[in-house]
Amino acid sequence: MDLRGTAIVFKKEIRDLFRDKKTLITSIIIPLVIFPIMFGLMGRGIDSSTKKVTENLKISVRDEGKSSFYEFIKTVPNINIMDSEDLKKDVQDGKIYLGVIIPADFDKVIADGKSADLRIIYDDASQSSSMAQEMIQSIVDEYSKEIVKSRLASRGMDVSILEPVKVTEEIVAKEKTSFAKIMLSMMLPLLLIIYATSTPIAAAVDLGAGEKERGTLEPLLTTQTSRMNLLFGKFFAITLMGIIGIVSSLAGLGVSMKLTPGLFGGEGGLTIKFGALLLIGLVTILLTMVFASLELAISIYARSFKEAQTYLSPLTIIGMAAAYGTYMLDVKNAGLMMFNIPIVNISLIIKELINGIQNPTHLGITFIWSIVYVALSIMFARYMFTREEVIFRT
């Protein structure tokens, strides 16, 4: 491979790709804006539904005996007690979130030291109604504790009997793991793998099958540059477009986390060391190189733009399957064998690095296999690029 010749081809391909508005839109603009739009809508929807219930808890109480529990409910802030002729119908229609039925003998049963019945009518198919049910349940639990305390006090017993065991929590991690970091360790490997698989596709199709379909590949082969220079020039151009797409996606995710911090559990605990970020970037680039070369080889084999897209779809599915396979996996329980499985090892390493774990054995195994995969995929692309029946397959 002649570096100068490869550089010339690389510059030419990058220039052509950036001239194509479709490539710019799919590789840069869409990944950059998709997450802020998606998470913005999700965050706004979640915040809206949560505030709607917590700030105006619309319920209806049918108190058949003027109970003390009804008076207790009225002291709770943000509860809007409404009239209802038919509790079940009004709950189903969404006029109220839930209905509470307090029997006439409620206070008498409690005064006798027994368990009183309380009916709660809600719609489990409604998010607002389910949230309201959880809030009312917490109010009932709080009221029940007060009743138990008064019963113990009336018998001259210490209320500490309610807590026979006191738990003292001691976190063994170097730093407290926030919900935001847990969310990031689940989402980031998934997103990086999906985009490492999918973002090079547009460039690969254009520089392979697209060239054949436009009839511009044959003139390139008649130039003085070798086929290996053409191959590596196209390969590096596709890899660069893949990396740009990944960076754009991560930038969009970063914007989303700033605009909707509540969706990610707040802003605390999201610090990742520079060394860990560097390693995450490196393994992602290696994975992008693997898929870039495979996609270029398949694109060269395809007869047309449309055929190439059909052939490349399974690669995206393979990447997604491996990513989703580790989505809920606790990385601390992953065995050594898992780090020998393609793509899965990349996901696990990213999870470890986000959580501040740098296991030299795991890193070594993953990087060695990643380099092997890159070499094998480039060899496959080289094999396809040297076959006349493949290049001139139309």
Image (tube, rainbow, N blue to C red):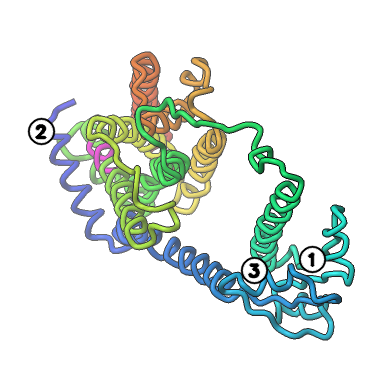
| Residue at image point 37% right, 23% down | 370
Question: Majority secondary structure of the magenta segment?
Answer: helix
Q: Is residue 98 left or right of residue 369?
A: right
Of the image marks 2 and 1, the number of the one nearer the N terminus:
2
Contact, CB < 8 Å: mark 2 with mark 1? no
Point out the tag, 3 or 1, that comes first from the N-terminus.
Answer: 1
Q: Is residue 87 left or right of residue 292?
A: right
What segment is highlighted magenta in the picture? 233-238
Magenta stretch encompasses residue 46: no
Residue 199 vs 279, above or below: the answer is below
The type of residue carrying mark 2 is: Arg
Q: As drawn, which residue projects farthest toward the front?
A: 156
Residue at figure coordinates x 74%, y 50% from the top left = 154
Residues under numbered marks 3 and 1 in contact, where contact means CB atoms less than 8 Å apart: no
Q: Which residue is mark 3?
A: 128
Residue tagged 1:
120
- Residue type, mark 1 in image: Ile
Frontmost residue, 137 versus 390: 137
Question: Could you tell whether 76 is left or right of 272 in the image?
Answer: right
Residue 237 within the segment the image draws in magenta? yes
Nearest the viewer among 58 and 343 is: 58
**Residue where numbered disc 2 is placed:** 4
Q: Does residue 222 appear left or right of residue 370 in this picture?
A: left
| Residue 138, quarter of the rendered image | bottom right
Q: Locate residue 131, reporting x and y percent.
A: 64, 63
| Residue 394 can be seen, yes or no | no
Residue 111: % across, % down: 83, 59
Between 60 and 355, the one nearer to me in the picture: 60
Cα distance, mark 3 to mark 1? 15 Å
When the figure is inspected, residue 196 is found, relative to residue 383, above or below; the finding is below
